Amino acid sequence: MNDVSLVPAKLNVDGLSNTDVARVQAFLPYCAGRTRCRWQLAPAGDLGHALFVDVDEPATINGAHRVPGGIVRIQRRGASRVPSGDPMVLSSPLQLEEFIQMLQRVEARMARAAVMTPAAAAFLPTPAAWSRPPGGDGAPLLAKTTAAAWPAHAARQPDGEAPGAVSLTAAYRLKRWPPAGILSTHRYNARLASFLSARHLTPRQLSTFSNVDSSWCVEFLSALQGVGLLDRQEATAHPLRASQSPPEHAVAAPAHRSANLLGRIRRRLGIE
Amino acid sequence: MADHKIVFAGSPGAGKTTAIGAISDRPPIVTDVRNSDSSLKKDFTTVGMDYGELDLGDGERVRLFGTPGQARFDFLWSILANNALGLVILIDNSRADPLRDLGLYLDGFKHLLPEVACTVGVGRTESHPSPSLDEFGDLLAARGLVCPVLPVDVRRRDDVLLIIDTVLAQAESRMA
């Protein structure tokens, strides 16, 4: 537990009254040892890993549904705007024990959202990093922060390969749809996962089909591989043999008409 | 004229008609009647099907069909979705049992799902975060299905386009 409790996680309390914020600040030091993450308040503009909002002061917060730990609603003690039995509802004024138990539930949601330990989930890139362009200098190192930081939870790899390592000559396919916590790190991820849901693809094929930068494709594959979500096939058994050159345009040739149709639909709808 | 189709299915009130309207070239043709089902929080509901079109030029078009949501019309679902380019299942997370709703549609399209690109869009997740998207993913995984599960607000065209993008991505991957 000691190593895990060092994992930082951020709590967004922008939607709370000054009184409740003060109580949260007072409670946080007492959470050590009771929660798996080391919780701290999220800086301004950072959605954090969990969002606390006041039901009496509803506000629209863009991207709130993507917060991995979920939204905790605070209502006055005795009020019934939301059912008190709802596990994501706390009563105000906040009480220490209820607050800690809520953080424990939030950590459980983070774990479910990422199919990894709560500690690993806390390493997901912060929402502030989600808008960084793929492949750029500031690209979130999703794979490194999951598999590399928590090798015990990484998928089994062929001998000699690091957990989460992606081979450029192997083809990968999703075993199941990825957790929202992984997909929400970038807008391209849902598209990439969709391609991977239907067949085995090499990193290069994935980049060609999706028109997404290859470095980001490798990063994304590595993140999925790191949490055991990918089935791997060696490219030699792959019918497209895309790992052999020149694959970039050749992969689309067998289904040129179909690809053309789908491309026209995309263009017609204005999908990049 | 070459025709293709994308089918929108899902629970009553999930926004199939609105989703079609978000991308159709023309206002969708709807077959709504005054709602007689007290469990649905809306005045009108679709009993036949909704219809929209996307003209691709050169004589090609994509027909957009919306199935009636209520289970008593399930005989129509597979008929409409047969040979579809893709299937969108929209779930209203504010309903009593959204996971059961999804199960109902997965059963209804069971024979088509291995062949048809399918994406699940879950609506009203901001006001009703439970069940989570990952719980929908769990349900699909338990059935051996790997389909995109995404939050959607059908009033936002960008959300609908993302759903369509994931359908097309699966279709392209299958066709290659």
Image (cartoon, rainbow, N blue to C red):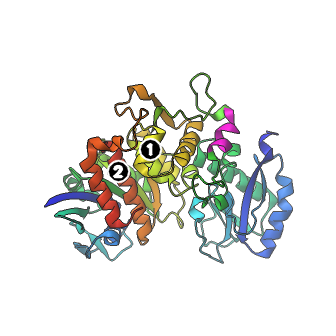
Q: Amino acid at mark 2?
A: Cys
Q: Residue at x 21, y 63 (%)?
A: B61
Look at the image and say whether residue B136 sits in the magenta stretch: no
Question: In the rendering, at what x and y percent does residue A271 appear?
Answer: 39, 63
Residue A10 is at least partly visible in this image? yes
Label 2 is found on which chain of the structure?
B
Label placed on residue A260: none
The front one of B4 and A254 is A254
- What is the x, y in percent for residue A79? 66, 73
Can residue A117 be seen here? The reply is no
The residue labelled by disc 1 is A206
Q: Residue at x 42, y 38 (%)?
A: A201
Q: Residue at x 57, y 54 (%)?
A: A134
Q: Nearer the viewer, residue B41 or A70?
A: A70
Q: Is residue B19 left or right of residue A215?
A: left
Q: Quadrant of the N terminus of chain A?
A: top right
Q: Which residues are magenta?
A: A143-151
Residue A127 shown left or right of residue A242 in the figure? right
Q: Which residue is mark 2?
A: B118
Q: Amino acid at mark 1?
A: Leu
Q: In the rendering, at what x and y percent does residue B103 appear?
A: 37, 49
Relative to B36, residue A115 above or below: above
Q: Secondary structure at mark 1?
A: helix
Q: Main secondary structure of the magenta part?
A: helix
Q: Residue furthest top?
A: A159
Q: Chain of mark 1?
A: A
